[in-house]
Image (tube, rainbow, N blue to C red):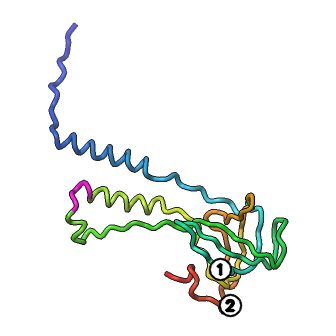
Amino acid sequence: MTTIPSPPRQRRGAPALLGALSILSAFVWSSVSAPAARVPEDRKKATHVLTGKVVEVVQGEGRQITVRFEATGVERGEDVAPGETLDIRISGPPDIKTVDTDSEEFKKLSEEEQKRALLEAQLSRLTHQGHHRPPGAGRKVRVFLIKGEGIWLGLFPDWFDVLDRDEERPDRAGPSDQD
């Protein structure tokens, strides 16, 4: 029986090892740091579909937003009467990180820190999650809600339809009108 000798192992050196380790660490870091994608909720699952107007939008702590809503009509659901005011909770979209690669601050970073900053910015765009921005005060809307225990939640992320697009709006300075 003849044995075929295997070729000698080639050494790749420290640069190849460091490159492989940086790719592996970026993969592990991104898989741990990136939150799971939130699945959009089907409007058919809304316990309540109401028409009315936005009374006020209140920014809470962090991304928490409360939309005070006055119902004028009930299309689906019970326990709500026209004229009733509800506080609807939604989570606002997170801030998307950006990196100015021309800035002096960025240029002072090590190559590894620059890669990390760019990766973080990329991940923030990929994991951009939150409800659609709420309409401004005075807007007539149809809302799609889930009633919890003592709380009203807007369906994620598409929780309302604007009904007064062609009418004169009472408040043009609402959050959804700013870009």
- Mark 1 or mark 2: which is in front? 1
Q: Which residues are magenta?
A: 109-113
> What amino acid is labelled 2 in the image?
Glu
The residue lying at 16 percent from left, 37 percent from top is: 12
Label 1, residues with CA under 10 Å away: few <14, some 14-19, many ≥20: some
Q: Marks 1/2: CA distance?
A: 19 Å
Quadrant in which the N terminus appears: top left
134 above or below 37?
Answer: below
27 above or below 137?
Answer: above
Q: Is residue 145 visible?
A: yes
Q: State the predominant SS element of the stretch in magenta.
A: helix
Q: Which mark is residue 56?
A: 1
- The residue tagged 2 is 167
Residue 27, how many percent across, how many down?
A: 36, 47
* Figure quadrant of residue 56: bottom right
For residue 8, side relative to residue 102 (left or right) = left
Q: Is residue 120 magenta?
A: no
The residue lying at 24 percent from left, 71 percent from top is: 102
Residue found at the far bottom of this picture = 168
Residue 37, how many percent across, how many down?
A: 53, 54
Please name whichever residue, 87 or 170, is drawn nearer the observer in this view of the structure. 87
